[in-house]
Image (cartoon, grey):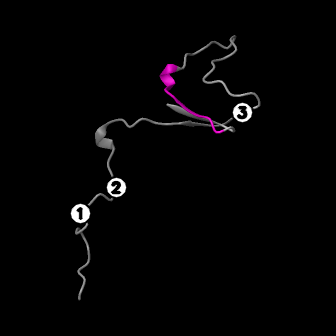
Amino acid sequence: QIMLVSDGGTVIRVPVNGIRFASRATKGVTIFNTAEGEKVVSVERISEPQSDEEESVEGEADATDDAPDIAE
């Protein structure tokens, strides 16, 4: 997916496979229309996780694991 942000605050997230390819002789592909005078200021690629196993949460542990003993 890609995310586009305009200087007017418009944000759109689009799946890349939904964007058709055009030859060099064409005018290009329109992803979204901006208002008059509005410009796209940022484009970012958003990667999809490959599998559930790769999505591990770091630091997820029982609160008592490796906790120091506290003397009263």
- Kindly indicate the quadrant of the structure image that contains residue 69: bottom left
Where is residue 41 drawn, in percent x and y? 68, 38
- Kindly indicate the quadrant of the structure image that contains residue 66: bottom left
Distance of mark 1 from mark 2, alpha carbons? 12 Å
Q: Residue at position x 23%, y 68% from top?
A: 65
37 left or right, relative to 42: right
Mark 3 belongs to which amino acid? Lys
Where is residue 37 drawn, in percent x and y? 77, 31
**Residue 39: mark:** 3
Does the magenta-highlighted stretch encompass residue 61?
no
Nearer to us in this view, 41 or 11: 11
Residue for badge 1: 62
Where is residue 54 drawn, in percent x and y? 32, 42
47 left or right, relative to 7: left
**Residue 58: mark:** 2
State yes or no: discs 1 and 2 in contact (Cβ < 8 Å). no
Does the magenta-highlighted stretch encompass residue 17?
yes
Q: Residue at position x 33%, y 59% from top?
A: 59
- Which segment is the magenta one? 9-18
Counting residues from the start of the chain, the first of labels 2 and 3 encountered is: 3
Q: Up-down: is 6 above or below 31?
A: below
SS at mark 3 in the image: loop
Mark 1 belongs to which amino acid? Asp
Q: Residue at position x 50%, y 20% from top?
A: 18
Mark 2 belongs to which amino acid? Glu
**Residue 72: mark:** none
Q: Up-down: is 70 above or below 35?
A: below
Q: Residue at position x 63%, y 18% from top?
A: 29
